[in-house]
Image (cartoon, grey):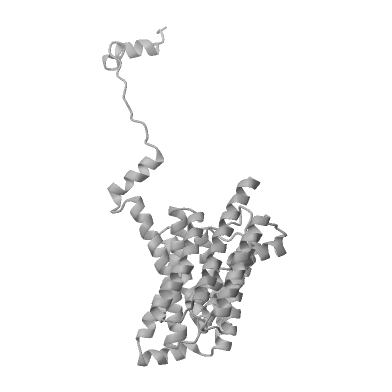
Amino acid sequence: MVEAQTWTTRRMSNPRLDTTANDQVLDIPATPPGDVRNNNAYTGGSYFSPTVTTALIIASWYCSNIGVLLLNKYLLSIYGYRYPIFLTMLHMIACAAYSYASINFLEIVPLQHIHSKRQFFKILALSAIFCFSVVCGNTSLRYIPVSFNQAIGATTPFFTAVFAFIITCKKETGEVYLALLPVVFGIVIASNSEPLFHLFGFLICVGSTAGRALKSVVQGILLTSEAEKLHSMNLLLYMAPMAALILLPFTLYIEGNVAAVTVEKARGDRFIFFLLIGNATVAYLVNLTNFLVTKHTSALTLQVLGNAKAAVAAVVSVLIFKNPVNVMGITGFAVTIMGVVLYSEAKKRSKVTTH
């Protein structure tokens, strides 16, 4: 019988594997922490540091948000392209096309699918509210200045609190409700002193603001389960084509054959095509930069930037369009913005106390 060779004898019989005399230990460096890797990553594959990248993204966010407002105002009020529903439909078509390319080819976020009819109809309901809000907002720019439009839009927290209470019976703290008083009071002052006040423009802008608040509340209710939650860019991918289809019969019935009118206009001024394509592209960039700002900073930073955006947009629009303003209007706008800031702080404190 042959004696079984043990591992020790096999190891000792091979001089190359003999490490008893001089054990060698490989010194493997520790993996650096995530923040170190992220801070050093740009030196290998990017031209900008994280700070510069974030600053550029925030600047792009401001440019796209203010740019789409100014372009809408120019097209609908000054250029004379008086088709806000068709313009909004172009925005939705562009958002659908750019979202498809961004998710499927550029892979900025993973593609998510709609898993049920129930989820589909929930997104369809959000699309209908989204349509109402955007069309009203664009239409209001035909009648009122951008500065007044932004002052009214700053009252979104008030409508959000109202809808949250009506629909979900959610009650806020007394401090939160008190912070909403200057939001409303400021817009009352601004409305009474607005030199270019237009009742219909004011009402549909209020409708747009209320629609935006309603969408945020309804979205929080409808897409609550983990299986139905969609990333903001995926939600846009599905909402945009639905919104375009919803708007199609309305633009045909109310605005007529806009496509033929647009082609006829282009024969005399081809710049209209560049205006429409540029306007629709910037409308998509608003959504993309919203996502990028949140990704590189936080949702709170986006909220703070949003508070400042209204004031910046108002100032820029006054400088470009030269619409008249007065001290009372500026005071009312400032009071509203102050109320929004107080509301944001009160909401933060209420969340800390509840948790």
Residue 123 can be seen in this image: no
- Residue 301 versus residue 261 in the image, above or below: above
**Looking at the figure, which quarter contains the N terminus?**
top left
Question: Residue at the spot x=45%, y=61% of the render?
Answer: 103
* Left or right of residue 30: residue 221: right
Residue 133 can be seen in this image: yes
Q: Quadrant of residue 129?
A: bottom right
Q: Nearer the viewer, residue 353 or 261?
A: 353
* Left or right of residue 228: residue 67: left
Q: Nearer the viewer, residue 151 or 110?
A: 151
- Residue 281 versus residue 56 in the image, above or below: below
* Left or right of residue 68: residue 179: right
Q: Nearer the viewer, residue 181 or 138?
A: 181
- Residue 337 versus residue 266 in the image, above or below: above
Residue 30 x %, y %: 36, 31
Residue 327 x %, y %: 49, 75
The number of numbered badges drawn on the structure is: 0
- The extreme front residue here reads 327
Residue 201 x %, y %: 56, 82
Q: Quadrant of residue 204?
A: bottom right
Question: Residue at the spot x=59%, y=84% of the render?
Answer: 200
Question: Residue at the spot x=60%, y=74% of the render?
Answer: 188
